Image (cartoon, helix red, strand yellow):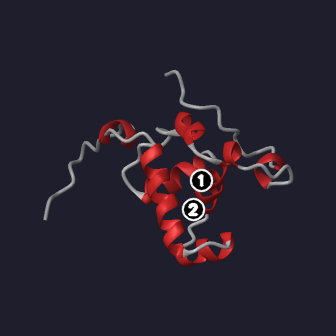
Amino acid sequence: MTERSDTADTSCAYRRTGADPVRGIGRLKRLTGREREVLLLLGTGLGNRALARELGIAERTVKAHIARIVEKLEQQTRLQAAVLSVIAHEVLCVDCHCACRQDPLRPAFRGPSAA
């Protein structure tokens, strides 16, 4: 078992691991309308069967959509695409009554910082 050092690394975990959770936001324009709809639902955490039921399509079609979404957004996994969906919800969601537009305390997505 490894021991944790007393001098814990306090740098940003994203920077330290090379992860960029908003990588792909600019690539959303590559998606078709249906792919955007699938991506938005993917962010809810539903499995393929539930996604298929919600969309009224075959589970095999859901898998094909997700594979294309992951590829177009240049993500590595379905989970990364789902995280991106949550981060970009306000950009993806077309419902004018959605809570993402109603909650004044919810920070609006403004894209990657220039820092």
Instruction: Please tell me which residue is depicted at 44% across the width and 57% down the height of the picture.
Output: 67
Question: What residue is disc 2 on?
Answer: 42
Q: Camera-side residue: 107 or 63?
A: 63
Residue projecting furthest to the left: 1
Mark 2 or mark 1, whichever is nearer to me: 1
Left or right relative to 75: residue 113? right
Q: Position of residue 4 (x, y in %)?
A: 21, 54
User: Circle 1 sits in a helix, a strand or a loop, which is it?
Assistant: helix
Q: Position of residue 49 (x, y in %)?
A: 55, 78
Q: Residues within 10 Å of mark 1 (few under 14, many from 20)?
A: some
User: Circle 2 sits in a helix, a strand or a loop, which is it?
Assistant: helix
Say if 81 sits above or below 63 in the image: above
- Mark 2 or mark 1, which has the lower sequence index? 1
Say if 46 sits above or below 110 in the image: below
State the mark number for residue 109: none
Q: Amino acid at mark 2?
A: Leu
Q: Camera-side residue: 80 or 73?
A: 73
User: Looking at the rendering, which quadrant does residue 12 occupy?
Assistant: top left
User: Looking at the rendering, which quadrant does residue 53 occupy?
Assistant: bottom right
